[in-house]
Amino acid sequence: MTLISFVVPAYRVQGYLRECLDSLLGQPFGDIEVVGVDDASPDTSGDILDEYAARDRRVRVVRLTENAGLGPARNAGLDRAAGEYVWFLDGDDWLAPDCLPEVADRLRATRLDVLVVDHVRVHWNDTASRSAMAEVFPEPPGATTFRLADRPETLRLLHTAWNRLVRREFLTGLGLRFAPGWYEDVSFTYPLLLAAERIGVLDRVCVHYRQRRSGAITRTRGDRHFEVFDQWHRVFGFLDDHPELAGLRPAVFERMVWHHLTVLGNGERIAAELRPAFFGRISADYRRFLPPGGYPAPDGVEALKHRLVAAGRWRTFSVLRGANQARATVRGVARRVLPVARRTARLTRDAALREYYRAELRRPVDPSLAVYAAYWYRGHACNPAAVAAAARRLAPQVRAVWIVRRDRVDTLPPGTEYVVAGTPAYYRALARARWLINNVNFPDYVRKRPGSVHVQTHHGTPVKVMGLDQQRYPLGAVGMDFAGLLRRVDRWDYSITANSFSTQMWERAYPASYTTLEVGYPRNDRLAVATAEEVAEVRGRLGIGPGERVVLYAPTHREHLPHYRPPFDSDRLLDVLGPTGRLLIRSHYFHDRLGLAGRRSRGRAVDVSDHPCVEDLYLAADVLVTDYSSAMFDYAVLDRPIVVYAPDRDAYALARGVYFDVTAEPPGAVALTFDELLAVFRGGGESTPTATRARRRFRERFCALDDGGAAERVVRRVFLGETT
């Protein structure tokens, strides 16, 4: 029998599910199965489960035809589980590395009914907070087992299903199931502990409990929080059915009151107009379930709260709560005084123009104005340029104005209307535009006006980690202001993605309430529909002859190593390519330049870092060589050979962080050293059947939407309001 069955419900967790599954399947312990339950998720969570099941026989997938909710989804997984123990793990949480061997040793040594493990809360800003384990068990219980009557303080551990493993035979014999509705853990975990004969505690952090910025129940206001009362009624119904457990009723009662007050005290859950009614329900249940002999009431302010609940005195309770919040506000203001002063000083030099901007914000939004920008105002490029071109054709009533740096004005196509960044015209356009389209974020001072629409097009499919995920890799995130990043992300109305993988990663890297348009990348429309005549014309403009074979080398930037140069010798590569070989070298658009290591190329190696249109280079190249750059996803649209050259693969993944290993799931041949790269071209490895199959799989996964119509789909949704 398999030792552990993981039941993983999945609903709107596409940005986190891979990390969850990888944390299970990558443990140094293989006697597990994973039952993934697609709770009719409207995103790609179900597809991710299928993908993992296709490559790992330990994964099985249950597909629900209708959204049932977390409790019933867990029940569906439990019905398919075959392990000796069941562990219910939410799809947005993940296991600590290497924890399973210790968990397995404890289970095998003690044959527990329930094993409770430790966890940490990992917040969206990459801070972490510990559990109550150390307070509940200041002296770790070790390998001893106990009943709840012996250690009733166990009830003070977080009452969730995911921080405990349950012996499946014990669970099925008990007939315990998850109830529908919110707070379903309550009516499951408390009866579980009450009935268990052998409870164990492992004081090792095993679960990373993700605290999401958006999408969690605790951040959702509404009357569904009243369902917590029904769940507690089920707990006391269980006690009524088991009179032998009456001695534990006082401890359970104290937990009930604590939980109700916790829910009420969270301003993000219970709206102000619902709080009196919620308090009334607490008081009613207090009187209904109060044990005849009393219960272990808390001390201090908490004791006062309990007395007010017992007396049903909402107004007094509300005044006390308001006073506590006022004290917290005063402390918070004091902590913010110094940072505000510093920000004010930094903004002084731009005060006059910003005041002008604020004045323009009071004028009406221009219903026909669309402002475009790309790469921090470097000019007319990328997805915004493709969207602007489609808008000229499909929505000619929309006036397009580009923002550009003064030193880049001469790169704009003739006839392009523009404003120079930092001028009064620039601030006026930002203030009054109805649409603002960018492939990066606009500056922090830009306001999101009612009636305006912000479109984030992005500028690549992510290999390296981005956004909030960079908090785990501080070497690659030096100087990043993550709080400021989130304020900018909150302005987005639309996020344009090229594939479901990007959608999933952006959802976790940039958590906010924008609408994702998974339509393909507009900038790749040109690649998808390019003709042989256009390719010949581009090659001619670049001085490339018809019989020459062109290799484009385009590595990405190393933020953590600004002076890094990959080992690369253009002369040696050209020697392998032969007399018809040409080499184009494209550095990242940031400040670093690779230069030409060779001296004998005689014009056959060209630095094209300053060429204004990277799509020209893609069309001209017969082969792309890159490392962790999003260039591979764009170039793959052309269905031409790609070689991944990753000489610092392990160091890059450790320092900068990657979402997936491009050497394990490549778009073609792979080389980890320069000699291996030479060997690839010397032996035709870039075009072998193996490389071609890898490219086909890569294209199926990442390029299916790049059919030439992405920009039109964006324009029809964003400018014309079409929803089909």
Image: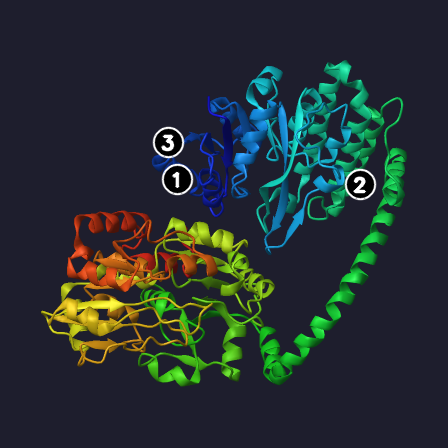
Observer-side mark, 3 or 2, equals: 3
Closest to the observer: 311 or 58? 58
Q: Which mark is residue 57?
A: 3
Residue 191 location (% of width, % of height): 68, 23
Q: Element at badge 1?
A: helix
Specify whether 674 is left or right of 400: left
Q: Element at badge 3?
A: loop
Residue 322 location (% of width, % of height): 83, 52
Asked if 617 appears above or below 495 in the picture, the reply is below
Residue 551 location (% of width, % of height): 21, 67
Which residue is farthest left?
A: 547
Label 1 near label 3: C-beta < 8 Å? Answer: no
Observer-side mark, 3 or 1, equals: 3
Observer-side mark, 2 or 1, equals: 1
Q: Which residue is mark 1?
A: 47
Q: Which mark is residue 276?
A: 2
Labels 3 and 2: the sequence-earlier one: 3
Label 3, label 2: how far apart the Cα atoms are: 52 Å
Labels 3 and 1: the sequence-earlier one: 1
User: Which amino acid does the dot numbered 2 rest on?
Assistant: Pro
User: Which amino acid does the dot numbered 1 rest on?
Assistant: Asp
| Badge 2 density bin: few <14, some 14–19, many ≥20, Cα 10 Å | some
**Residue found at x 39% / y 49%:** 500
Specify whether 693 is left or right of 324: left
| Residue 374 sits in quarter | bottom left
Q: Which mark is residue 366?
A: none
**Residue found at x 37% / y 39%:** 51
Residue 147 location (% of width, % of height): 72, 23
| Badge 1 density bin: few <14, some 14–19, many ≥20, Cα 10 Å | some
Label 2, label 1: how far apart the Cα atoms are: 44 Å
User: Which amino acid does the dot numbered 3 rest on?
Assistant: Arg
